[in-house]
Amino acid sequence: MLRATVFGLLSLPGVVCAQMDDDADRMAYLEEQVKQLTGDLEEARHDLKLMKETVKVLQENAVAAPAPAPVVNRDKETRVPSDVDETGKKHDAAHEDDTSVHELPTGSAQEAYDHAVSLIHKQREYQKAEAALTQFIKKYPKHRLVVNAQYWIGETHLLRREYKKAALYFARAYKTYKSDVESGKTSEGKQHSFAKAPEALIKLAMSLKGLGKRDEASATLRQLHKEFPHLPTNLKHLAERAQNGL
């Protein structure tokens, strides 16, 4: 396809070629077009990789799950941010600095996590929050809040309408939850993580809807109701918002 495009460029209409001063200018123009096409191709490959990983997570878990206990909303963070609607569109998010590194505060893992999440809720600095949560996962890879951190990274992308990345991280959070269940990690210390699983599926559906993948979004919500039939009222309402328009 790229080669055909290049050959097509070599046969430029006379009116365009006439505007070229000489062969060097023409070749420079062609090289720039090829460079742009190559960049577009790499971006498409990256997007495809993200979507394949997301679909793989859904397929791996689209099996009958053991009957779950009723979901208890123990996480006070459980809410829809005020600046995002059911499709993940943000309204008036604050300006963000272009940074990929954020220093976590010294102290406990819980303090580091709380700081990262506060960047979302209090400061609305979503890019900094993403960086802080990523650092948290790297620093505390075995901590019980890793699944929550994955969820909130997805949230930062959803708030920025970066639906592909949002879908990937919500799928990862759900997969982490499933891994905990399958490995028998059901102690009280894990219950905080379990509370995020249904939200991850709902936000995954929102992200897929934002990508225009309505069938996949509907399938995700069916999985939600199959696995978590006893949702608390706030999550029922959130799921209804995700379902709207599908």
Image: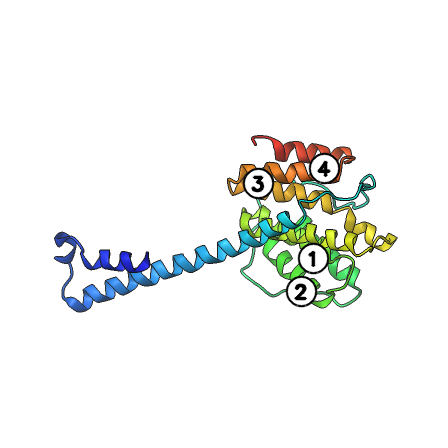
- The answer to which of marks 3 and 1 sits earlier in the sequence is 1
Going 20% across and 60% down the picture, which residue do you hit?
10
Of the residues shown, which amino acid type is indicated by label 4?
A: Lys
- Residue at label 4? 226
x, y (%) of residue 210? Answer: 54, 41
Left/right of residue 18 with respect to residue 95 in the rendered view:
left
Q: CA distance from mark 2 to mark 4?
A: 34 Å
- Residue at label 2? 135
Of the residues shown, which amino acid type is indicated by label 3?
A: Glu
Of the residues shown, which amino acid type is indicated by label 2?
A: Gln
Going 76% across and 35% down the picture, which residue do you hit?
229
Going 78% across and 52% down the picture, which residue do you hit?
181
- The answer to which of marks 2 and 4 sits earlier in the sequence is 2
Q: CA distance from mark 1 to mark 4?
A: 32 Å
- Residue at label 3? 216
x, y (%) of residue 154? Answer: 63, 51
Tag 1: Cα neighbours inside 10 Å, few (<14), some, or many (≥20)? many
Tell me the tag on residue 116: 1
Tag 4: Cα neighbours inside 10 Å, few (<14), some, or many (≥20)? some
Of badges 2 and 3, the one in the foreground is 3
Q: CA distance from mark 3 to mark 1?
A: 30 Å
